[in-house]
Amino acid sequence: MPRPIVAQIHPAAVSHNLSIVKQRASRSRAWAVVKANAYGHGIDRVFPALANADGIALLDLDEAVRVRELGWTKPILLLEGVFKPGDVQIAQQFDLSMAVHCREQLDLLRLSPSHERVNVHLKMNSGMNRLGFRPDAYRAAWEQARSAGIADITLMSHFANADDGDVAWQMDRFDAVTQGIPGQRSLANSAAVLWHPQAHRDWVRPGVVLYGGSPTGQSRHIDDVGLRASMTLRSEVIGVQSLSAEETVGYGRAFAANREMRIGVVACGYADGYPRHASTGTPIAIDGVMTQVVGRVSMDMLTVDLTPCPHAQIGSKVELWGDQVKIDDVAHASGTIGYELMCALAKRVPVEIA
Ligand SMILES: *Cc1c(COP(=O)(O)O)cnc(C)c1O
């Protein structure tokens, strides 16, 4: 008998979330961002849900080739561009668009035969200070790309704090430098899709919202958006303990009962991708009843308070995250964001498409 843990991927939720993005940014085209193997969901599994996207954006050449093999004929964008000379040829062979964020990449591209036909997303570092040409070097980079014969150049930048602040400080820099330069614009991540319509421009680049996650890492910030969770992590109760007052649970004796209580042992631990830092109080559902994790999460198991669900027993169904238990709430109680939990789903967890 396998352990009862299973992850369910819901392609219908992804296509629903994509349609919400398209409504919100109805004048823009949308790249569906599927980097990190579709935020842990599996590109193959979510691929059928992306039919209405205008393009697919990711990082790895392998994943891009896979998307072509799956039959995608619309644009594919390499968000970090290419890393070595051979990559350019593969990118051309599979008709991939690519970010160009530094002089080295521009040189790589210029040295490659028939680079003129590559669609380039020339990236400006407008304040994120991760990748991109600085504003004062941007126009020169654009002119170099143009004089190398590259005809199709999209002007791109990325926001540092679209989830909890203003984007004007970056947009103003971007607009000042790109004024008069022809070409499409692409700025908006999920947070900007939801909260900064002035940043939508020609192409938006939503990632986490496609999977029902909150760009802020807090579920309450997307309560009114109508997104659906695209990943459910389920398991079962595999043990029940009755504690008397002052007995403790698990490693480090991190939780002590202050009265008699029933504890459920769930087949899910940090080796499954559940966060070890989930503190006592992290939400979890047993047979549809909300309760809390208590004590320390161990490698293969975690423990829960069965007080609100007195009928729970071995075999009771557990939702670790999904529709009822928001992944961002689990993440928040663990000092992280839903993005990380999606991406960290462990290989050993069997996955079903539901
Ligand atoms: C990851 C990424 C996105 C999507 O970010 P979300 O916050 O998940 O929407 C957009 N643009 C770039 C360049 C990225 O790397």
Image: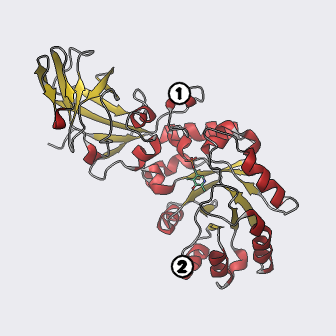
Crowding at label 2, few (<14), some or many (≥20) Cα neighbours within 10 Å?
few
Q: Quadrant of residue 180?
A: bottom right
Closer mark to the observer between disc 1 and disc 2: 1
Residue hosting label 1 = 220
> Which amino acid does the dot numbered 2 rest on?
Lys
- In the displayed structure, 121 sits above or below 302; it is below
Nearer to the camera, 172 or 311: 172
Q: Quadrant of residue 118?
A: bottom right
Residue hosting label 2 = 84
Disc 1/disc 2 C-alpha distance (Å): 43 Å
| Residue at 35% across, 47% down | 345
Please state the horizontal and vertical placement of residue 26, each as a whole percent of the image.
73, 40
Q: Which mark is residue 180?
A: none
**Which mark sits nearer the N-terminus, 1 or 2?**
2
| Residue at 46% across, 39% down | 230
Crowding at label 1, few (<14), some or many (≥20) Cα neighbours within 10 Å?
few
